[in-house]
Each structure stands twice: as structure tokens, then as C-alpha cells.
Amino acid sequence: MASSAGTLVPASSTTFEQPDPLAADHEATAVLELIARCGWAVVATPLGNIHATSPDGRIYLAWLPEDASAWARRIIWELHVHPTDGPAWTQEFGPDTPSQAVAAFLAALLPPTP
């Protein structure tokens, strides 16, 4: 490539690094895509929080990026599971947990897709 003065200017290339899968991504895309494929009921609040329930009603998931009480507890993901056998349990993930990790955790709880 030549500049207007006739000297050669080295070509520049832009390289895009893949994001670190172990780092926080501060988004919900991976989880939202998973639950959409699985037919979950999803409700988004005007503030941007998302609440979802599995088709069988046994798993509730909340993404709480705008919930002050959740942030005070350093929680952005909240999962409530109601097994058919055994007590209900809860899992929470903080704001620095990658959405891919939350999606993988959730996928491990879901029945296999045909």
C-alpha cells in the first residue's frame, strides 16, 4: 500500500482474539439460547431481568442483572430445582461466572434431547 507521499506503508491486519471461556462475559446469550431450544417459558421484566421455567415446571431460572438485592449478595444467576424424589435445592452464580459455565451446568440437569 502506498501513502500519498509515495512511500510504502505496511499493511495492517486486525486480529481478534477469542474470549477467554473462563472469564466473565456479563451476558446471558448462552443460557437464553439453551432454554429457548428446550421450550422454556420466559418472562422479561421492564428492568431487564429474566425469569424462566422449564416445560415440566421443576426448574426455575432467574437472570438478575438489574436486581439490587441480588447484586448486594453478589448473585446474578439463581436456579431453583424441584426433583421428583428428594428435597428442592438452589444454586446461585455470581456476576463473574461466564454464561457458558451456567449454560453447561443447566444443560447437565436437562433430559437428553432426541
Image (cartoon, rainbow, N blue to C red):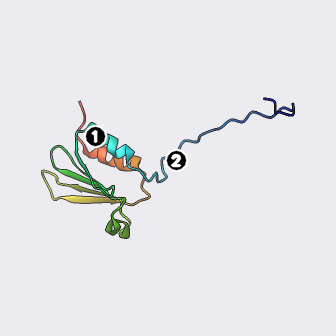
| Residue at point 31%, 56% (across, down) | 49
SS type, badge 2: loop
Q: Which mark is on residue 20? A: 2
In the image: residue 5, left or right of residue 30: right
Tell me, yes or no, if residue 29 can be seen here.
yes
Q: Do the residues labelled 2 and 1 touch (CB within 8 Å)?
A: no
Depth check, front residue: 34 or 81: 34
In which image quadrant can residue 73 be found?
Answer: bottom left
Instruction: Check the image and name the residue furthest to the front.
Output: 4
Residue reaching furthest left? Answer: 84
- Element on which disc 1 rests: helix
Label 2 sits on what residue type?
Asp
Give coordinates of residue 5: x percent, y percent.
Answer: 87, 34
Q: Comparing marks 2 and 1, which lies closer to the viewer?
A: 1
Instruction: Identify the residue at image location x=32%, y=69%.
Output: 69
Residue 98 position in % (x across, y down): 43, 51
Q: As rendered, which of 55 and 65 lies closer to the eye?
A: 65
Q: Indicate the position of residue 105 as horizontal and vertical percent values.
A: 33, 48
Asked whether residue 104 appears in the rendered view, the answer is no
- Figure quadrant of the N terminus: top right
Q: Is residue 8 above or below residue 33?
A: above
Where 90 sits versus 42, above or below? Answer: below
Q: Label 2, label 1: how many angstroms apart (C-alpha)? A: 25 Å
Residue 24 locus on image (x, y percent)? 47, 54
Q: Give the residue at mark 1.
A: 36
